[in-house]
Amino acid sequence: MIIAMIIWSMNGKLVDVETAFLYGDLDEEIFMECPDGMRSSRNECLRLNKSIYGLVQAARSWNKKIVEILKKKGFKGGMADPCLWTRTTEKGTVFLGIYVDDNLIVGNESAIKEAIESLKEERLILKVDDYLNDYISCEILFSENKDMAWIGQPHLIKKMEEKFGHLYGDLQTYMMPGTPGFRVIRPKDGEDMISKHDQKLYRSGVGALLFLVKHSRPDIANSVRELSKVLDGAHPAAFKEMLCVMRYVSDTKDLGLKIQPNKNEDEMWDIVVYTDSDYAGDEDTRISVSGFVIYVMGVPVCWKSKAQNHVTLSSSEAEFVALSEAAKEIKFVVQILESMDIKVKKPVIVRVDNNGAIFMSENVAVTGKTKHMDIRYHFVREFVEDGLIKIVFVKTKENDADVFTKNLGSDLHSKHSSKMITWKVML
């Protein structure tokens, strides 16, 4: 959502609602003890008329309040994404992204000012930052002509270096995040395990890396997915692999998400998707791995590296399962864009490197090799028939999703990831 908003308009402001949780209305009767310094008897207490910080329902009450205000002020939305709202007036269109009390508003400059003033009319105390350079702990930079942007997470990487730097400082420099071909295997009884202290560090480290994957570093997605398999009990090899990934991230701290929309005179926005799978990649369970990346106007807006829910019986079936995972996200992305009144070019092009998966997605025939497959995957065919997606073949070496299913060598990893991330200095 945030990336789509930035693509749509390079004009933006950050709007922080001060003491936001104090605006919420309560639906229940809630009482609290009298605070220290207040004159009261032992049997007296206070009944709350409004929400305050510390209540379990404080965030929910604030969300209901801000939604009520936005609807009153003419904003529409909240269907495809409850945190995305749109308003169009004579002065232009604005999009408002809600993240608790931190709000991102982009669009026409005069329309932004009008929207902020209308919110102030509701007696909200707003702190407005005219520079869109830091949001939800992500640094956002724009080129001088604002035709390109960069999203990174230097704050998180700095904390990671402070906590783990002494552990990986002596490791060699790596050209890719994970050892090619390396897969984390769950420890068996009697095998060496890391200590409880190191296991706590391991969970903390993988959690930090997962947050990097979420916002700015799709290039480490597969390596981090492998590490997350043993959060309950890792062996020394897995711990060392985590440190190798951290060393790579530290050495490439100036890499971040690349936002450089394709120049297109057509009003229609194009979406291109790559999907891939690693058949029976988990040596313990023989479960395959799904991976996909979705580009909107050439900008990566959604990516995933995920173990499939069950064992598949062929590489074609594994590719079809990965395709179905991507199809769900395609539907969501299209709904988001259409809720922003953005026209989407259909059908959406989905690139797959397996002809068997393409055949299964376009034909209804049931054979001995496919009749066992879960019916929930067959909705892909409906998307094809309805004209939402069009599935085409792509060579494996040209499939960007390959980086989400296995640890690749440096050349192939760099080839795929360079389309998603770029160096900070390139701006």
Image (tube, rainbow, N blue to C red):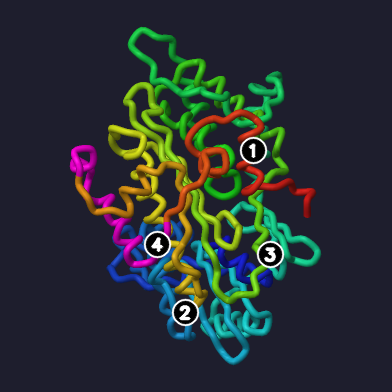
Q: Which mark is residue 331?
A: 4
Categorize mark 1 by other alpha carbons within 10 Å: few (<14), some (14-19), many (20+). Answer: few
Quadrant placement of the C terminus: bottom right
Q: Earlier in the sequence, mark 1 or mark 4?
A: 1
Question: With respect to residue 249, does 285 lie above or below?
Answer: above
Quickly name the residue at label 3. 132
When asked about the image quadrant of residue 145, the answer is: bottom right
Categorize mark 2 by other alpha carbons within 10 Å: few (<14), some (14-19), many (20+). Answer: some
Quickly name the residue at label 1. 159
Q: CA distance from mark 3 to mark 2?
A: 22 Å
Could you tell me if the residues under marks 2 and 4 are in contact, i.e. CB atoms within 8 Å?
no
Amino acid type at circle 2 is Leu
Question: With respect to residue 154, does 67 lie above or below?
Answer: below
Quickly name the residue at label 2. 70
**Mark 2 or mark 4: which is in front?**
4
At mark 2, the secondary structure is helix
Given residues 116 and 121, the one toward you in this image is: 116
Residue drawn at 28 percent across, 50 percent down: 377
